[in-house]
Image (cartoon, rainbow, N blue to C red):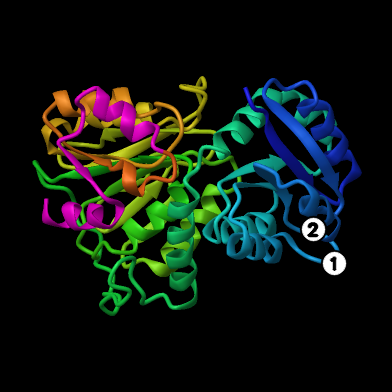
Amino acid sequence: MKKIKAIVIDDSAVVRQAFSEILKNAAGIELIAASADPIFAMKHMEKQWPDVIILDIEMPRMDGLTFLRKIMKEHPTPVVVCSSLTDEGAQTTLQVLSAGAVDIITKPKVGLQDFFQDARRALVDTIKAATQANMKKLQRNAAVSEAIAVHPKLSADAMIAPRPQPRLPPRLNNPGDPVIAIGASTGGTQALELVLKSLPTNTPPVLVVQHMPAGFTEAFARRLDGICAVEVKEAKHLDEVHQGRVLIAPGAYHMLLQRSGVHKYCVEVKDGPVINRHRPSVDILFRSVAQTAGKNAIGVIMTGMGDDGARGLEEMHKAGAFTIAQNEETCVVYGMPKEAIKRGAADLILPLEKIAEALIEK
Protein backbone atom coordinates (compact mmCIF):
# COMPACT_ATOMS: atom_id res chain seq x y z
CA MET A 1 0.00 0.00 0.00
CA LYS A 2 1.27 3.45 -0.92
CA LYS A 3 2.41 5.47 2.08
CA ILE A 4 1.02 8.92 2.88
CA LYS A 5 3.76 11.49 2.29
CA ALA A 6 3.76 14.14 5.02
CA ILE A 7 5.71 17.33 5.57
CA VAL A 8 5.95 19.28 8.85
CA ILE A 9 6.40 23.06 8.76
CA ASP A 10 7.08 24.53 12.20
CA ASP A 11 9.74 26.91 13.50
CA SER A 12 10.00 24.93 16.75
CA ALA A 13 12.81 22.38 16.64
CA VAL A 14 11.08 20.48 19.47
CA VAL A 15 7.87 20.15 17.43
CA ARG A 16 9.78 19.02 14.34
CA GLN A 17 11.70 16.44 16.37
CA ALA A 18 8.52 15.15 18.06
CA PHE A 19 6.70 14.71 14.76
CA SER A 20 9.74 13.05 13.21
CA GLU A 21 9.85 10.48 16.01
CA ILE A 22 6.09 9.83 15.81
CA LEU A 23 5.77 9.59 12.04
CA LYS A 24 8.85 7.48 11.40
CA ASN A 25 7.13 4.72 13.40
CA ALA A 26 3.60 5.33 12.08
CA ALA A 27 2.31 2.65 9.74
CA GLY A 28 1.34 4.00 6.34
CA ILE A 29 2.98 7.45 6.74
CA GLU A 30 6.32 8.70 5.47
CA LEU A 31 7.77 12.00 6.68
CA ILE A 32 9.48 13.50 3.64
CA ALA A 33 10.65 16.74 5.29
CA ALA A 34 10.51 18.83 8.47
CA SER A 35 11.09 22.51 7.73
CA ALA A 36 11.46 25.58 9.91
CA ASP A 37 9.32 27.80 7.67
CA PRO A 38 7.31 27.73 4.39
CA ILE A 39 10.21 29.10 2.31
CA PHE A 40 12.40 26.12 3.19
CA ALA A 41 9.42 23.76 2.83
CA MET A 42 8.65 24.89 -0.71
CA LYS A 43 12.16 23.90 -1.80
CA HIS A 44 11.44 20.35 -0.61
CA MET A 45 7.97 20.41 -2.17
CA GLU A 46 9.37 21.32 -5.56
CA LYS A 47 11.16 17.97 -5.54
CA GLN A 48 8.42 15.86 -3.95
CA TRP A 49 4.88 17.04 -3.29
CA PRO A 50 3.32 15.85 0.00
CA ASP A 51 -0.09 14.23 0.47
CA VAL A 52 -0.61 16.20 3.68
CA ILE A 53 1.00 19.26 5.29
CA ILE A 54 1.24 19.80 9.07
CA LEU A 55 1.47 23.56 9.37
CA ASP A 56 2.36 25.97 12.16
CA ILE A 57 0.72 29.40 12.02
CA GLU A 58 3.23 31.87 13.46
CA MET A 59 6.56 31.54 11.65
CA PRO A 60 9.31 33.83 10.37
CA ARG A 61 9.45 35.01 6.75
CA MET A 62 5.97 33.69 5.87
CA ASP A 63 3.08 33.01 8.24
CA GLY A 64 0.92 29.91 8.00
CA LEU A 65 -2.22 31.67 6.75
CA THR A 66 -0.37 33.31 3.86
CA PHE A 67 1.24 30.00 2.94
CA LEU A 68 -2.08 28.14 3.12
CA ARG A 69 -3.79 30.61 0.80
CA LYS A 70 -0.90 30.26 -1.65
CA ILE A 71 -1.13 26.45 -1.57
CA MET A 72 -4.91 26.41 -1.96
CA LYS A 73 -4.65 28.66 -4.99
CA GLU A 74 -1.74 26.93 -6.72
CA HIS A 75 -1.84 23.28 -5.63
CA PRO A 76 -4.70 22.37 -3.23
CA THR A 77 -3.38 19.95 -0.61
CA PRO A 78 -4.80 18.75 2.72
CA VAL A 79 -3.40 20.90 5.54
CA VAL A 80 -3.58 20.17 9.27
CA VAL A 81 -2.99 23.22 11.44
CA CYS A 82 -0.63 22.89 14.40
CA SER A 83 -1.75 25.68 16.73
CA SER A 84 -0.90 26.95 20.20
CA LEU A 85 -3.54 26.92 22.93
CA THR A 86 -3.90 30.69 23.25
CA ASP A 87 -6.78 33.02 22.51
CA GLU A 88 -4.80 34.71 19.74
CA GLY A 89 -3.79 31.32 18.37
CA ALA A 90 -7.41 30.17 18.38
CA GLN A 91 -8.59 33.23 16.45
CA THR A 92 -5.90 32.82 13.81
CA THR A 93 -6.57 29.07 13.58
CA LEU A 94 -10.21 29.76 12.74
CA GLN A 95 -9.09 32.03 9.90
CA VAL A 96 -6.87 29.21 8.62
CA LEU A 97 -9.74 26.71 8.85
CA SER A 98 -12.00 29.09 6.95
CA ALA A 99 -9.28 29.46 4.32
CA GLY A 100 -9.21 25.71 3.69
CA ALA A 101 -7.31 23.83 6.40
CA VAL A 102 -8.79 20.41 7.15
CA ASP A 103 -8.26 20.00 10.89
CA ILE A 104 -6.45 21.19 14.04
CA ILE A 105 -3.68 19.73 16.16
CA THR A 106 -3.08 21.64 19.37
CA LYS A 107 0.23 22.20 21.10
CA PRO A 108 0.61 23.49 24.68
CA LYS A 109 3.05 26.18 25.75
CA VAL A 110 5.13 23.70 27.74
CA GLY A 111 5.72 19.96 27.74
CA LEU A 112 5.56 19.65 23.95
CA GLN A 113 7.55 16.43 23.72
CA ASP A 114 5.46 14.60 26.33
CA PHE A 115 2.21 16.00 24.93
CA PHE A 116 2.89 14.78 21.41
CA GLN A 117 3.92 11.34 22.63
CA ASP A 118 0.74 11.02 24.72
CA ALA A 119 -1.37 12.13 21.75
CA ARG A 120 0.49 9.93 19.25
CA ARG A 121 -2.55 7.94 18.09
CA ALA A 122 -4.75 11.02 17.72
CA LEU A 123 -2.06 12.81 15.71
CA VAL A 124 -1.62 9.89 13.31
CA ASP A 125 -5.40 9.46 12.93
CA THR A 126 -5.80 13.18 12.17
CA ILE A 127 -3.11 13.06 9.48
CA LYS A 128 -4.63 9.97 7.86
CA ALA A 129 -8.12 11.47 7.97
CA ALA A 130 -6.92 14.69 6.34
CA THR A 131 -5.82 12.83 3.22
CA GLN A 132 -9.40 11.71 2.65
CA ALA A 133 -10.72 15.26 2.44
CA ASN A 134 -12.39 16.29 -0.81
CA MET A 135 -10.28 19.31 -1.69
CA LYS A 136 -12.71 20.64 -4.32
CA LYS A 137 -15.49 20.85 -1.73
CA LEU A 138 -13.09 22.32 0.82
CA GLN A 139 -11.98 24.99 -1.66
CA ARG A 140 -15.53 25.88 -2.58
CA ASN A 141 -16.57 26.22 1.06
CA ALA A 142 -13.38 28.13 1.88
CA ALA A 143 -14.08 30.66 -0.88
CA VAL A 144 -17.55 31.33 0.51
CA SER A 145 -16.33 31.42 4.14
CA GLU A 146 -13.65 33.97 3.33
CA ALA A 147 -16.18 36.04 1.36
CA ILE A 148 -18.52 36.04 4.36
CA ALA A 149 -15.66 37.06 6.65
CA VAL A 150 -14.93 40.09 4.45
CA HIS A 151 -18.57 40.85 3.56
CA PRO A 152 -20.83 39.55 6.36
CA LYS A 153 -23.97 40.16 4.28
CA LEU A 154 -22.93 37.56 1.71
CA SER A 155 -24.80 34.27 1.95
CA ALA A 156 -23.57 30.78 1.12
CA ASP A 157 -25.40 30.20 -2.14
CA ALA A 158 -26.99 33.30 -3.61
CA MET A 159 -24.14 35.41 -2.13
CA ILE A 160 -26.66 38.14 -1.30
CA ALA A 161 -28.38 37.74 2.06
CA PRO A 162 -31.06 39.93 3.65
CA ARG A 163 -29.81 42.55 6.07
CA PRO A 164 -29.31 40.86 9.47
CA GLN A 165 -32.47 41.08 11.58
CA PRO A 166 -32.51 42.49 15.11
CA ARG A 167 -32.23 39.65 17.62
CA LEU A 168 -35.41 38.73 19.41
CA PRO A 169 -35.71 38.63 23.20
CA PRO A 170 -35.52 35.10 24.65
CA ARG A 171 -38.83 33.24 24.42
CA LEU A 172 -39.72 30.29 26.62
CA ASN A 173 -40.28 27.04 24.82
CA ASN A 174 -43.87 25.92 24.52
CA PRO A 175 -44.80 22.24 24.62
CA GLY A 176 -44.10 20.85 21.16
CA ASP A 177 -41.60 23.53 20.12
CA PRO A 178 -38.78 21.98 18.08
CA VAL A 179 -35.14 21.69 19.08
CA ILE A 180 -32.46 21.35 16.39
CA ALA A 181 -29.34 19.24 17.01
CA ILE A 182 -26.40 19.34 14.58
CA GLY A 183 -23.27 17.20 14.55
CA ALA A 184 -20.16 17.70 12.39
CA SER A 185 -16.45 16.93 12.27
CA THR A 186 -13.84 17.27 9.50
CA GLY A 187 -14.90 20.13 7.23
CA GLY A 188 -17.61 21.09 9.69
CA THR A 189 -16.38 24.54 10.69
CA GLN A 190 -17.01 25.83 7.17
CA ALA A 191 -20.23 23.85 6.74
CA LEU A 192 -21.67 25.12 10.02
CA GLU A 193 -20.77 28.68 9.12
CA LEU A 194 -22.68 28.38 5.85
CA VAL A 195 -25.76 26.84 7.50
CA LEU A 196 -25.97 29.05 10.59
CA LYS A 197 -25.37 32.24 8.57
CA SER A 198 -28.61 31.49 6.69
CA LEU A 199 -30.86 31.06 9.74
CA PRO A 200 -33.27 33.86 10.77
CA THR A 201 -33.61 35.21 14.31
CA ASN A 202 -36.78 33.24 15.01
CA THR A 203 -35.07 29.89 14.38
CA PRO A 204 -35.79 27.21 17.02
CA PRO A 205 -32.95 26.58 19.46
CA VAL A 206 -29.91 24.88 17.92
CA LEU A 207 -27.42 22.63 19.73
CA VAL A 208 -24.14 21.91 17.96
CA VAL A 209 -21.34 19.42 18.45
CA GLN A 210 -18.35 20.18 16.25
CA HIS A 211 -15.30 18.02 16.89
CA MET A 212 -12.77 20.63 17.97
CA PRO A 213 -10.07 20.74 20.67
CA ALA A 214 -10.57 22.56 23.95
CA GLY A 215 -9.72 26.22 23.69
CA PHE A 216 -11.07 26.70 20.16
CA THR A 217 -14.84 26.37 20.51
CA GLU A 218 -15.22 29.68 22.34
CA ALA A 219 -13.40 31.54 19.58
CA PHE A 220 -15.41 29.61 16.97
CA ALA A 221 -18.67 30.61 18.66
CA ARG A 222 -17.60 34.27 18.85
CA ARG A 223 -16.74 34.27 15.16
CA LEU A 224 -20.12 32.83 14.23
CA ASP A 225 -21.94 35.20 16.57
CA GLY A 226 -20.43 38.12 14.68
CA ILE A 227 -21.74 37.01 11.28
CA CYS A 228 -25.07 35.31 12.13
CA ALA A 229 -28.53 36.72 12.81
CA VAL A 230 -28.98 34.13 15.57
CA GLU A 231 -27.05 34.35 18.83
CA VAL A 232 -24.14 31.87 18.92
CA LYS A 233 -22.24 31.06 22.10
CA GLU A 234 -20.12 28.33 23.62
CA ALA A 235 -22.41 26.38 25.94
CA LYS A 236 -22.07 26.67 29.70
CA HIS A 237 -23.57 24.22 32.16
CA LEU A 238 -27.33 24.83 32.56
CA ASP A 239 -27.47 27.43 29.78
CA GLU A 240 -31.08 28.02 28.75
CA VAL A 241 -32.14 26.68 25.37
CA HIS A 242 -34.44 29.10 23.56
CA GLN A 243 -35.49 30.47 20.20
CA GLY A 244 -32.81 32.33 18.26
CA ARG A 245 -29.91 30.83 20.23
CA VAL A 246 -27.20 28.42 19.06
CA LEU A 247 -25.18 26.62 21.74
CA ILE A 248 -21.90 24.99 20.73
CA ALA A 249 -20.51 22.20 22.92
CA PRO A 250 -17.19 23.26 24.47
CA GLY A 251 -14.12 21.29 23.44
CA ALA A 252 -13.28 18.39 25.81
CA TYR A 253 -16.80 18.32 27.31
CA HIS A 254 -19.98 16.48 26.36
CA MET A 255 -23.22 18.44 25.95
CA LEU A 256 -26.69 17.00 26.62
CA LEU A 257 -30.21 18.39 26.38
CA GLN A 258 -32.33 18.20 29.51
CA ARG A 259 -35.61 19.54 30.84
CA SER A 260 -35.70 22.61 33.05
CA GLY A 261 -39.21 22.77 34.45
CA VAL A 262 -42.26 21.97 32.34
CA HIS A 263 -41.80 24.21 29.31
CA LYS A 264 -38.09 24.89 29.24
CA TYR A 265 -34.91 23.16 28.15
CA CYS A 266 -31.33 23.67 29.27
CA VAL A 267 -28.04 21.96 28.51
CA GLU A 268 -25.88 19.82 30.71
CA VAL A 269 -22.17 20.29 30.05
CA LYS A 270 -20.06 17.63 31.69
CA ASP A 271 -16.86 15.66 31.62
CA GLY A 272 -16.93 12.00 30.75
CA PRO A 273 -15.21 9.27 28.78
CA VAL A 274 -14.23 9.75 25.16
CA ILE A 275 -16.97 8.32 22.91
CA ASN A 276 -16.11 7.23 19.37
CA ARG A 277 -12.69 8.86 19.99
CA HIS A 278 -14.36 12.20 20.66
CA ARG A 279 -15.33 14.49 23.52
CA PRO A 280 -17.67 16.18 22.81
CA SER A 281 -19.46 13.36 21.03
CA VAL A 282 -22.30 13.83 18.56
CA ASP A 283 -23.83 10.53 19.72
CA ILE A 284 -24.08 11.81 23.29
CA LEU A 285 -25.93 14.96 22.16
CA PHE A 286 -28.25 13.14 19.73
CA ARG A 287 -29.20 10.47 22.27
CA SER A 288 -30.08 13.07 24.89
CA VAL A 289 -32.19 14.97 22.35
CA ALA A 290 -33.98 11.76 21.35
CA GLN A 291 -34.79 11.02 24.99
CA THR A 292 -35.71 14.58 26.00
CA ALA A 293 -37.39 16.12 22.93
CA GLY A 294 -38.40 12.99 20.99
CA LYS A 295 -40.63 13.76 18.01
CA ASN A 296 -40.23 17.51 18.60
CA ALA A 297 -36.58 17.41 17.56
CA ILE A 298 -34.73 17.85 14.28
CA GLY A 299 -31.37 16.13 13.82
CA VAL A 300 -28.70 17.02 11.24
CA ILE A 301 -25.51 15.06 10.63
CA MET A 302 -22.89 16.71 8.46
CA THR A 303 -19.42 16.22 7.00
CA GLY A 304 -16.94 14.28 9.11
CA MET A 305 -14.64 11.30 9.46
CA GLY A 306 -15.80 8.14 11.24
CA ASP A 307 -19.26 7.27 12.52
CA ASP A 308 -19.85 9.50 15.55
CA GLY A 309 -23.50 10.58 15.49
CA ALA A 310 -24.78 7.79 13.24
CA ARG A 311 -26.23 5.75 16.11
CA GLY A 312 -27.53 8.85 17.85
CA LEU A 313 -29.31 10.05 14.72
CA GLU A 314 -30.85 6.58 14.40
CA GLU A 315 -32.17 6.92 17.96
CA MET A 316 -33.62 10.33 17.13
CA HIS A 317 -35.25 8.88 14.00
CA LYS A 318 -36.80 6.02 16.00
CA ALA A 319 -38.08 8.53 18.57
CA GLY A 320 -39.98 10.33 15.81
CA ALA A 321 -37.59 13.22 15.17
CA PHE A 322 -37.12 14.62 11.67
CA THR A 323 -33.61 13.81 10.50
CA ILE A 324 -31.29 15.15 7.79
CA ALA A 325 -27.95 13.92 6.45
CA GLN A 326 -25.62 15.97 4.26
CA ASN A 327 -25.13 14.37 0.85
CA GLU A 328 -21.88 12.90 -0.42
CA GLU A 329 -21.47 15.48 -3.18
CA THR A 330 -21.07 18.40 -0.75
CA CYS A 331 -19.22 16.67 2.12
CA VAL A 332 -15.53 17.34 2.65
CA VAL A 333 -15.38 13.87 4.22
CA TYR A 334 -18.35 11.57 3.66
CA GLY A 335 -18.00 9.44 6.78
CA MET A 336 -20.52 10.35 9.47
CA PRO A 337 -23.46 11.01 7.10
CA LYS A 338 -22.68 7.85 5.15
CA GLU A 339 -22.89 5.71 8.29
CA ALA A 340 -26.14 7.36 9.36
CA ILE A 341 -27.68 6.80 5.93
CA LYS A 342 -26.58 3.14 5.96
CA ARG A 343 -28.54 2.76 9.20
CA GLY A 344 -31.67 4.24 7.62
CA ALA A 345 -31.48 7.12 10.08
CA ALA A 346 -32.05 10.00 7.63
CA ASP A 347 -35.46 11.21 6.45
CA LEU A 348 -33.78 13.55 3.97
CA ILE A 349 -30.37 13.57 2.26
CA LEU A 350 -29.56 17.13 1.22
CA PRO A 351 -26.73 19.19 -0.24
CA LEU A 352 -25.12 21.61 2.20
CA GLU A 353 -26.77 24.69 0.67
CA LYS A 354 -30.26 23.21 1.16
CA ILE A 355 -29.96 22.30 4.85
CA ALA A 356 -30.75 25.75 6.29
CA GLU A 357 -33.76 26.03 3.98
CA ALA A 358 -35.07 22.67 5.24
CA LEU A 359 -34.63 23.77 8.86
CA ILE A 360 -36.50 27.01 8.24
CA GLU A 361 -39.37 25.26 6.45
CA LYS A 362 -39.66 22.55 9.08
Determine if the magenta segment contains residue 223.
no
- Point 50% across, 28% down: residue: 278
Which label lies toward us, 2 or 1?
2
Compared across the picture, whether 253 is left or right of 202 comes to right
Between 343 and 133, the residue placed more toward the observer is 133
Q: Name the residue at 30% across, 34% down.
A: 257
Range drawn in magenta: 334-362
356 or 292, which is in the foreground?
Answer: 356
In which quadrant of the rendered view does residue 8 lie?
top right
Residue 82, horizontal then vertical, whole percent: 70, 46
- Residue at the far left: name it: 176
Under mark 2, the amino acid is Pro
Image height check: is 313 above or below 69? above
- Labels in figure, total: 2
Query: Along the horizontal axis of the image, is 229 left or right of 135?
Result: left
| Residue 159: x %, y % from top left | 33, 74
Q: Closer to the N terminus: mark 2 or mark 1? A: 2
**Dot 1 lies on which element?**
loop
Q: In the drawing, what numbered circle is on residue 359?
A: none
Q: Is residue 294 above or below residue 275?
A: below
Q: Is residue 346 magenta?
A: yes
Answer yes or no: do the residues labelled 2 and 1 have beta carbons within 8 Å?
yes
Question: Residue 288, can we see it?
Answer: no
Label 2 to label 1: alpha-carbon separation: 8 Å
Q: Residue at x 15, y 23 (%)?
A: 318
Tell me the tag on residue 61.
Answer: 1
Q: Give the number of the disc on residue 38.
A: 2
